[in-house]
Amino acid sequence: MGFQIDIQNLGYQILKNRQILTDLNLQIAPGDFLAVLGENGAGKTTLLDLILGFRKPSQGTLKVQNEKPYQDNWKSRQEIAYLSEKVDIPGDWTVDDFLKFNEYFYTRYSHEIEAKYLKVFRVNRMDRLGNMSAGEIRRVQIVAALSIEPKLIVVDEITAVLDIVGRRHFMGVLRDLNRETRCTIVLATNILEDLADHITHVMLLRKGVVKTFGPLAAFLGGADASAFSRTVADLLEDGL
Amino acid sequence: MIYHFIKRDFISHRLPWAILVMGTFFSLMFFSYNHLIYLGLLYAYLLFAMSPMGEMTGAKWRSQHVMSRSYLLALPVDRKALFAVTQWRALIFFTPLIALAFILPTFLPEAQRIYINFIPKNFPFGIYHVLVILMVVWLLNSMMNLPLGFERVWAYPTQQKRMIAYARMIGVFLFELFLIILSCMETYLYGSKPIFPLVVTGFVAFIRFYLTRRSWLTSL
């Protein structure tokens, strides 16, 4: 079963006067697959950083499995997979170097799962990261992150650099993991294509304020999943 | 865990290490009669120690040259312990510099003229060595702190604020350096006890270590 995330009156500001997130109140239940959507600068990455404990909330509380992430409850990160465009690995490493380096930190690391995903994402262990494209490096990170058998997967906009096939595989793998292991997934993205086929919940952020949060079915309001992209775009364009 | 990181660092930097060893060997073999070669070696070791500091600190943004701090801080490792590991990793690259600074005054008294002329002659044996270590700790943390500071300043909204922040950062660095040198010179010129520069350098190094750690842990 996945992790639960409780957010109450959460606010975050930088440089004393720039408010990034304002008064967020929501609960992400175990097994939810949440898509965090919003314009550039809406606060998606900041929210994910707060979930990972990279930042300390300015107001309110954020708890992951009843623990405040910024207090560095590092043992719980054994079961948290983090995939971000900000994550990078030195180019002189091979895929094998990185996987072995990463594996060291995780007690539940599965070589069986690693082998499975290396095949799914067509990653060659001996390739040098410096010679790979941004999308190929993301595939390597996906393999490493999912091999820890996570209970919470936090994904910060990495699908944009994946090619069509890579993205389809990635979203399919996330959906299967969510359905089979009931792990919780929080995915910040700007790519809406096929998203409604995979997620269970939606959050729309606008200028740091939650405008919509809830199950996908309620969001669609009886409309077909194919209407998802249009609905989101309309809501964002109309200023909600 | 520290071995895991250091092993990886050594694999990534085996070529610079090999060049350093060969350079030292040939320098001593052919030019050991010239005192200036030791000064050259000191600078070479200093540059060698500084070169991987960016890697140790990790980058905030995407870079294929160094590991990102997002990755490091997301690992299931106590973040304060991770910072300590980072310090040890960086210190490994300072070992040639520390070793040379340790032995130089012993077999080459002229060393005090060429690179440590502010340290008094007959400086007590143990205190000099601790002082070298403290200076390295201060320098190491200053070199980690500067890029962290620059990352923070880049987010400032106006150029004026950025310029003031840059000037302040560099000013603080120079002030700390001034304090350390002054404490040593004071001992030299006015004959206060050798423990004095040790206390001053230790204090400056500790403050710099503490501020760098706080900055490293909270700068994403």
Image (spheres, helix red, strand yellow):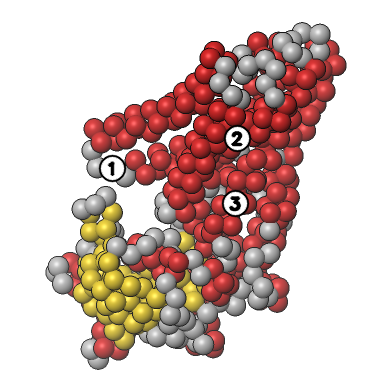
Q: Quadrant of residue A116?
A: bottom right
Residue A40, placed above or below residue B57: below
- Report x, y in % for residue B92: 69, 40
The mark that comes first in sequence, 1 or 2, is 2
Label 3 SS:
helix
Q: Mark 3 or mark 2, which is nearer to you?
A: 2
B191 horizontally vs B149: left or right: right
Q: Amino acid at mark 2?
A: Leu
Nearer to the camera, A23 or B170: B170
What's the mark number on residue B156?
Answer: 1
Q: Amino acid at mark 3?
A: Ala
Q: Residue at x 56, y 27 (%)?
A: B197
Whether residue A2 sits left or right of residue B100 in the image: it is left
Task: Check the image and report above or below for B48 versus A224.
Answer: above
Q: Nearer the viewer, residue A17 or B20?
A: A17
The answer to whether marks 3 and 1 mark residues whose Cβ atoms lie closer than 8 Å is no
User: Which element type, helix, strand or loop, lies under badge 2?
Assistant: helix
Give me the chain letter of mark 2. B
Give the amino acid type for the residue marked by disc 1 in the picture: Tyr
For mark 3, what is the residue? B84
Would residue A120 be seen by someone viewing this image from the given angle?
Answer: no
Which x, y percent locates residue B17?
A: 74, 34
In the rendered image, the quadrant that contains the C terminus of chain A is bottom left
Q: Residue at x 76, y 24 (%)?
A: B103
Crowd class of label 3 (few under 14; some 14 to 19; many from 20; radius 10 Å): some
Q: Give the mark nearest the N terminus, 3 or 2.
A: 3
